Amino acid sequence: MAGNVAAEESASLPTLAVTAAVGAVVLLLVLLCGVGQGKSQQDADKTEELEKNSKVKKHPRKAKPKPAPKQRQGAHSFSHTLLATSLKGHSSRVMGLDFSNNAKYLATCAEDRTVRIWSLKDWTDKEHKSVQVNVELDHATLVKFSPDNRAFIVALYNGNTIRVFRIGRKDEGTGIQVSALEQDFPQKSIKDIIGLGISSNGKFMMTAFADTSIYVWNTKPGGEVLATIDTHQMENYHAAVSPCGRFIGCSGFTPDVKVWEVNFAKGGDFKEVSRAFELKGHSSGVYSFDFNMDSTRMVSVSKDGTWRLWDTNIEYQKGQEASLLTKGEIHSAANCMVAMAPNGSSFAIAQGYDISLYSAETGQEEEKFTDVHAEPVTAVAFDLGSKYLVSTGDKHVRVLHNTVGYQALLHDLQHKLKTTQSTAYKERLKEQIKETEDALKAIVGDEKGEKDKKDKENSKKKGK
């Protein structure tokens, strides 16, 4: 019996050894898996941290593309006696435009992923030359020239940020060449950019988003945020830098237009952004607004179905508020935009496919342009001389004569002629009056020009 027990014990020894070996292997595998998982988690945590701290962020794609605007059925054509020309070159809808400060160029940006630079001296020609600039991996919705005309910036649709392009002369000295900087500005919001601007003194840039945020940047490459503004408007609709370079204005869901001043120290260093004044009077959200050249006048359009013209030549530091000069009704309360001539003589309101031209002096609608584009108007602006009104909406750029601007200039010259005492200055004024009258007659003809002149005189007499 003792022999049998010994035999059984000797037979079970290999089994125990095998079991122990298998257990050790399993334990080793468990430990290795745990270490691997821990390392993977650490790597994932490090990757996430690097992505958060990275200066160059990936541009997220829009969750949903914007619906295509309603387009007129059939082939579209637009003609009007005040149509100066149509600029053709883009292959899809043009979204934004801007004039250079030297009055030589017009920049337009489109959904075809290009920006085109047009020469203003070619407007009277049958063919219009332009320089095409490609916007890589995105398209621009807004474009603004720098004050020195050596660069322009665009707002990127997918990237929701700023891209800078430099303008230089070609080697042979004729024409221009454009190149983008290597790095876009840092992305600050996933919301669309609804406002873009550069101050005329070149000290700051502005981006406004479709939430309640506005960012003020310095103009150095790469971008540095000088200040942020919370507009408290629930949603921003429109924002702009004033042509004088002092102010940033913003309108939105609330019925007021808010204006801030960007302050700099005597040495040129940024100081602060302070509230300047507000335009109060609308009863609903303000779609759009605009300044004249020296910011002494502003115009606004609202959901309440009215436009308002404001006197902003005020000492707001002393508590003065902007005052209402005149107001009127727009054709409907639908979404619209407004632009003011730099000389303050006129303003234009675009709604859907139509554009109305108003006199700032009388508040009267002087011209109505219908079906200007095959798609709703996306941008409208006056040239620096206040002689042309330019609009975009489809793939063409419309250039219209601003007869109201000519008439205002003529009236101003005639007033100066009556008040001046200098003989030499009188002769120069007479020459300018004749040139303006000839230009106006060439646009509208003698008969209509005389009728407009009489209508304006009668309107003044009624006003008195």
Image (cartoon, helix red, strand yellow):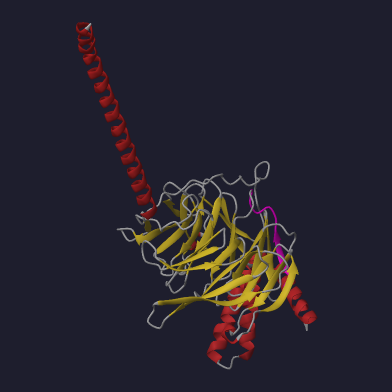
Tell which of 54 and 367 is nearer to you.
54
Q: Is residue 370 magenta?
A: yes
Instruction: Tell which residue pokes out farthest to the bottom in this image.
Output: 421
Q: Quadrant of the C terminus?
A: bottom right
Nearest the eye: 311 or 385:
311
- Where does the N terminus fall, quadrant-wise? top left
Give the image location of residue 97, x and y in percent.
53, 59
Q: In the rendered view, tell whether residue 400 sits above or below residue 460.
A: above
Vertical placement of 458 versus 307: above or below? Answer: below
Magenta-colored stretch includes residue 394:
no
Q: Residue at x 21, y 14 (%)?
A: 14
135 over 25 or under it: above or below: below
Location of residue 343 with respect to 55 vertically, above or below: below
Q: Which of the 4 image quarters holds residue 64? A: top right
220 relative position to 454: left or right:
left
**In this picture, residue 10 sits left or right of residue 299:** left
Viewer-side residue, 103 vs 136: 136
- How many numbered markers are drawn? 0
At horizontal 40% and vertical 83% (from top left) the residue drawn is: 266
Residue 265 seen in the current view: yes
Per the rendered image, the range of residues in magenta is 363-374
**Camera sees residue 362:** no
Would residue 52 appear left or right of 325 to someone viewing this image? left
Q: Residue 409: where, in percent of width, then height?
A: 61, 76
| Residue 459 screen position, x and y as percent | 77, 77
Outermost front residue:
1
